[in-house]
C-alpha cells in the first residue's frame, strides 16, 4: 500500500538556514586545494555537513511570515558562517605573514610556483607555509572544533536571534590582530639573522673593495635562512595551538558555549 511522505515546511526552512550557515564557512575556509576543486564537490561537502547536523537543526515554531523575514534570517545565517570561516582564515594567515616577511629578505621571492588556493604565481616559501598550515589544521583536530562550534551555535544562536555584543566583536577583532603580531614574532629571529648577515657582508665589502661579496651574499643568506627555518618549524605546532585556543575562545564567547 503506497504511503505519502510528508516533510513539514518548517523542516525545509531549517535545512535551508543550516545549509546557509555551513556554506558560509566553506566559502572562506582557506584550505589548500579546496577552492581549486570542482564546485560540485564543495556543494556535496556542504550538504553532507548539513545533514550530519540534523539533530541540531533549529526547531521553528512557524515558517517565516514573509520574504523579508526569510532574507533577514538567511543573511544572519550567512554572517555566522562567514564569521567562523574568517576566524580560521585569520589563524592560517599567521604563517603566510611570517613566510612573506622572510621570502623578501632571504631571496626566496625570486622562485615562484603555482598557488593551489588561488592558481596564481606565488613564492615557494609562501606555498610551504600554506601547506604546513593546512596540515596543522587537520592534525590538531580543528576540523572537529569547527563542527562542534557550528553545532553549538545552532543551539545558542537559532535563526532570527543573532545577538553579538560589542565585547564579543572586539574579542574576535583582537584575535585577528594576531595575524601580524604572531606572524612577525615567528619571523623575527630569522629577520634578525638576515639583518646581521647583510651588515657583515656590507662591512666586508667596505673594508676590502676587491672582494666580490655580492656573488656569495645570496647563497649565504638562503643557506642561513633554511638552517634557522628548519629549527623554527618545530615551534609552528605550539604557536598554532595557542593561536587556535585564543580564536575558538573568542568564537565561543560570540556564538555561545
Image (tube, rainbow, N blue to C red):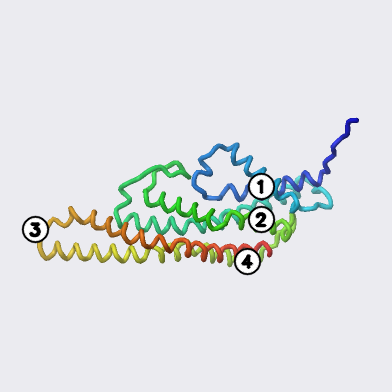
Q: Report which residue position mark 1 lands on.
A: 49
Q: Nearer the viewer, residue 228 or 197?
A: 228
Q: Nearer the viewer, residue 235 or 17?
A: 235
Position of 218 with respect to 211 (left or right) is right
Quarter of the image with the C terminus is: bottom right
The answer for how far apart the CA atoms under marks 2 and 1 are is 10 Å
Which mark's residue is nearer the viewer, 4 or 1?
1
x and y percentages locating residue 38 in the rendered image:
55, 37
Asked if labels 1 and 4 touch by Cβ distance under 8 angstroms, the answer is no
Asked if labels 1 and 2 touch by Cβ distance under 8 angstroms, the answer is yes
Q: Report which residue position mark 2 lands on.
A: 150
Q: Around disc 4, counting alpha carbons within 10 Å, would you say few (fewer than 14), some (14 to 19), or many (20 or more)?
A: some
Q: Report which residue position mark 4 lands on.
A: 168
Q: Secondary structure at mark 1?
A: helix
Q: Secondary structure at mark 2?
A: helix
Residue in view at x 69 percent, y 59 percent = 152
Labelled disc at residue 143 = none
Residue in view at x 82 percent, y 41 percent = 7
x and y percentages locating residue 125 in the rendered image:
37, 52
Q: Secondary structure at mark 3?
A: loop
Labelled disc at residue 210 = 3
The tag earlier along the polypeptide, 3 or 1, is 1
The tag earlier along the polypeptide, 4 or 1, is 1
Q: Around disc 2, counting alpha carbons within 10 Å, would you say few (fewer than 14), some (14 to 19), or many (20 or more)?
A: many
The tag earlier along the polypeptide, 2 or 1, is 1
The answer for how far apart the CA atoms under marks 3 and 2 are is 65 Å
The tag earlier along the polypeptide, 3 or 2, is 2
Residue in view at x 59 percent, y 63 percent = 248
Amino acid at each position: 500500500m503506497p504511503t505519502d511522505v510528508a516533510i513539514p515546511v518548517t523542516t525545509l526552512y531549517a535545512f535551508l538556514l543550516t545549509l546557509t550557515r555551513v556554506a558560509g564557512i566553506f566559502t572562506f575556509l582557506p584550505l589548500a586545494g579546496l577552492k581549486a576543486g570542482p564546485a560540485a564537490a564543495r556543494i556535496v561537502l556542504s550538504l553532507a555537513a548539513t545533514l550530519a547536523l540534523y539533530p541540531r537543526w533549529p526547531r521553528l515554531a512557524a515558517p517565516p511570515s514573509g520574504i523579508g523575514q526569510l532574507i533577514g534570517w538567511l543573511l544572519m545565517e550567512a554572517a555566522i558562517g562567514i564569521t567562523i570561516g574568517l576566524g580560521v582564515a585569520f589563524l592560517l594567515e599567521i604563517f603566510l605573514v611570517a613566510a612573506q616577511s622572510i621570502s623578501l629578505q632571504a631571496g626566496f621571492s625570486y622562485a615562484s610556483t603555482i598557488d593551489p588556493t588561488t592558481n596564481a604565481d606565488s613564492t615557494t616559501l609562501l606555498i610551504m607555509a600554506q601547506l604546513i598550515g593546512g596540515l596543522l589544521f587537520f592534525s590538531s583536530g580543528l576540523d572537529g572544533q569547527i563542527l562542534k562550534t557550528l553545532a553549538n551555535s545552532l543551539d545558542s544562536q537559532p535563526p532570527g536571534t543573532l545577538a553579538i555584543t560589542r565585547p564579543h566583536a572586539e574579542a574576535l577583532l583582537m584575535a585577528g590582530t594576531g595575524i601580524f603580531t604572531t606572524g612577525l614574532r615567528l619571523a623575527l629571529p630569522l629577520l634578525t639573522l638576515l639583518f646581521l648577515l647583510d651588515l657583515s657582508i656590507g662591512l666586508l665589502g667596505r673594508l676590502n673593495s676587491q672582494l666580490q661579496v655580492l656573488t656569495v651574499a645570496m647563497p649565504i643568506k638562503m643557506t642561513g635562512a633554511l638552517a634557522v627555518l628548519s629549527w623554527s618549524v618545530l615551534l609552528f605546532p605550539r604557536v598554532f595551538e595557542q593561536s587556535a585556543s585564543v580564536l575558538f575562545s573568542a568564537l565561543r564567547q560570540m556564538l555561545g558555549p
